[in-house]
Amino acid sequence: MISMSNIEPNNKRSTQLEKPSIPLSQREGQGGESLVQGGESFIRIILIGYMGAGKTTVGKELAKALGLTFYDLDWYITTRMRRTVKEIFDERGEEGFRRIEHNMLHEVAEFENVVISCGGGTPCFFDNMEYMNQQADTVYLKASPEVLYAHLQMGKGVRPLLLNKTPDEVQQFIREQLAYREHFYSQARHIADVNLMDNFSKIANTVADIREMLGV
Ligand code: S3P
């Protein structure tokens, strides 16, 4: 069970991150992805990518492999708001959801020694992408529209943006939205190709690839 007991007090935010604009993996003498805050080092990894890319699946496995705590931003929103993502969309519209998502991102991206998976739209609103790059080592799980569609067909989660569309309309929507969002996703510090990730051993391969990329 994921615990929220390690929520940081707000005053922690005034602590300076060490040179956040330099890719963490390129910092000298820090052995990969450690951030330094108040003299102690820690790991914070954020996974981004389109719906169906496998952010939650990979995030859980990556966190397990590294002995870190896993947070899924949609899960966090749902828990804090006591509403499903669909209910929030229904009650407040997409705009209301994006505001909540932005605020909750600022809570989870303060946690230390965590792997966080975001919603597919998180990087594309406000200054979220820039903020995530400051706070963490970001990894874009990149897949083609065809692979994303196939993953989404297998998944059971309710995605408000895909509801009430025919299969053809969903495929068209994914192609168009991914083309628009690519600009944001490609700002991640690292990119992992997940086109071949369709069973458990391949999830393990992706986790191994990311660990090698990040040096953790
Ligand atoms: C969204 C993706 C969803 C969820 C919401 C909106 C998006 O998360 O945040 O339905 O805009 O792409 P997943 O990417 O985890 O499905």
Image (cartoon, rainbow, N blue to C red):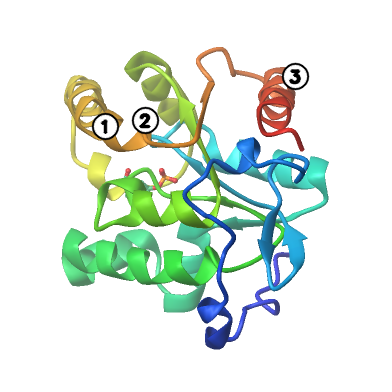
Say above or below: 79 vs 151: below
Left or right relative to 94: residue 56 = right
**Residue 197 versus residue 184 in the image, above or below:** above
Mark 1, residue position = 183
Asked if labels 1 and 2 touch by Cβ distance under 8 angstroms, the answer is yes
Whether residue 110 sits left or right of residue 123 in the image: it is right
Cα separation between marks 2 and 1: 6 Å
Q: Residue at x 74, y 25 (%)?
A: 208
Q: Secondary structure at mark 3?
A: helix
x and y percentages locating residue 143 in the rendered image? 43, 20
Which residue is disc 3 drawn over? 201
Q: Position of residue 130 (x, y in %)?
A: 36, 51
In this rendered view, identify the residue nearer to me: 57 or 162.
57
Mark sitting earlier along the chain (3/2): 2
Mark drawn on residue 186: 2
Q: Quadrant of residue 3?
A: bottom right
For label 2, the SS is loop
Mark 1 and mark 3 residues within 8 Å of each other at the beta carbon: no
- CA–CA distance between discs 1 and 3? 30 Å
**Image position of 122 (left or right of 210):** left
Q: In the rendered view of the protein, which quadrant contains the C terminus?
A: top right
